[in-house]
Structure formats: structure tokens, C-alpha cells
Amino acid sequence: MIDFNSIDLFFYNRYTEYLIKELKLSTNTVGKNIQVIKLILNEAVEIGVSKNIAYKSKRFLTVREKSDSINLSKKELQEIETLDLSSDKTLQNVRDLFLIGCYTGLRYSDYSTIKPEYFNNGYLEITQTKTGAPVVIPLHEVIIKILDKNKGLLPKSISIQKNNDYLKDIGKKIDSLKTEFVKSITKEGFNQRTIYQKWELITSHTARRSFATNEFLAGTPTLTIMAITGHKTEKSFLRYIKLTSSEHAKLLKGHWEERKTKAALTVG
């Protein structure tokens, strides 16, 4: 029988070995399991039902690796926005709802349940379902167009599973999303690489990740983006966004050119 006192480093090693070798789980899934255990143990200590603090050891590690999830660039979002879906009302609604997520940074549980009364003088005011935290977001012009097209009504939402299926149907209509994307994952202690076309990996969460990445590239202060996405630390936020080496280089070049312009204006 496993009780609070039996969860020590010996348990940790055997348990993670079981998850990796027997259940063949990925590194991040193993990490989530350990994280849940540590949360329970921490709560048990705080309320006084356990005195076992073995979980606080540095070797009781919540393992994780950077995930290879996609984000969509501003150009790709524009292509999705201008795609003619007039013959399919369902795909049109899914596309419009996805764009609302891309320009609010909200989770699907929030951007799929927005009500007209949440809009106030050009802002969206909503309490996030997952965190319970209120957030105020200015309405992007794309969202305003969607609202005008629908006479102030929001696109009808569907189950997240169906939504993700339809997003892929939309994505494969766009040539720029047929580029290859290599996804790496560690399972059973080995790195496994799978090649996808980018559209195959689009999900409702791609909207939120695209918002964070695009705003960062546009120069929006990190703390401002974090106030909307809900990331608690800059470290976790920077791990969340997706920047390629080319994007990092362009970002740096942009900063150089901005400083050069400011210096020239100062001299002038």
C-alpha cells in the first residue's frame, strides 16, 4: 500500500521508470504526473496530515522538455482571414472563432464562450475560466470586422474536438501551411522525430500561442502580454512562445535599426 510516508526518492525512481518503460509515456507527460504528486504532497504537509518532505529534494525532479508546438505568423493569419469560406458556414464560424483567439490570447474555454455583454467601449472584459483572473483586452480590428459581419453576435462554438478537426480542414486549404514541420518527442528515453505538414498540427491552442509570439515579435512589452496570457514568470513565458533562429535574428536587427534611427534623430 502506498501512503504519504512511502513516497520518497526510491518511489520516485521506480514510478518514473514504470511511466517511461511500461506505459511508454513522453517526458512531458511523466513530468505532469510528478507535478500532480508534488502538489498533493505539498498540500498534505500544509494541512498537517503528512510530515514527509522527501518530495522537496532536488532529485525529485519534475522533468520536462520544450514542446514542438506550432504558432502561426501574421501573414499566415491574414491568409486564414481572407480565405473564401462563404460556401461552408461551419468552417466560416470555426475560422472566425479561431481568429478571435489569435487576437485576444485567450484559451478556447474562454474565447469560445464570449458574450456580447463582455464588450465595453472597444475592450473585452472577461474573467478567465482556468485562473479566475479578470483580464481586459482591446478589440483588434480583425475582431471588430467579425462582429460587424455577424451584427454584433459571436460565431457559434462547438466541441473542442470537432473544432480542432475543422481547423485542420481549413489549414490544408492554405498552401503556405503545407510546409514540413518536424516534431520531436522523448519516449522510452529515446528521441523520436516525426514529420508533419504544418496544417496537421493546428489546434484551438495554436491561437493563444500565435498571439503571444506575434505580439512579442511586434515589440509589445513582455509584461503586457503576460498580463493577458496569465504567465507568472518571464522565464515561463519565453519558454512558451515559439521563435525560430531567423526570427531572433530579425528581432535583433530591428532593435539595431531602431537604435540607429534614434541616435540619428538625437544628433540632428
Image (cartoon, rainbow, N blue to C red):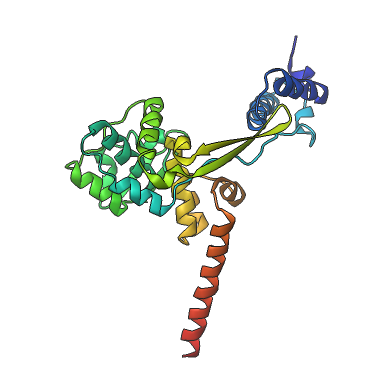
Q: Is residue 178 left or right of residue 16?
A: left
Above or below 144: residue 45:
above
Q: Provide residue 157's location: percent of width, then percent of height.
A: 31, 30
Residue at 25% over, 45% down: 146
Residue 179 drawn at (x, y percent):
48, 45
Q: Nearer the viewer, residue 178 or 213?
A: 178
Residue pictured at 51% horizontal, 69% vertical: 254
Q: x%, y% of residue 252?
A: 56, 66
Give the residue at the far bottom of this rendering. Answer: 268
Quarter holding residue 87: top left
Q: Is residue 132 visible?
A: no
Please state which of residues 183 and 14 is positioned toward the viewer in this rendering. Answer: 183
> Is residue 233 visible to us here?
yes
Give the answer, above or below, for where 249 lies relative to 236: below
Q: Is residue 60 left or right of residue 131?
A: right
Rendered residue at 74%/30% (across/down): 189
**Image coordinates for residue 139, horizontal then vertical, percent:** 31, 51
Label count reads 0
Q: Residue furthest left?
A: 151
As drawn, the residue found furthest toward the right would be: 10
Is residue 107 placed above or below 120 in the rendered structure? above
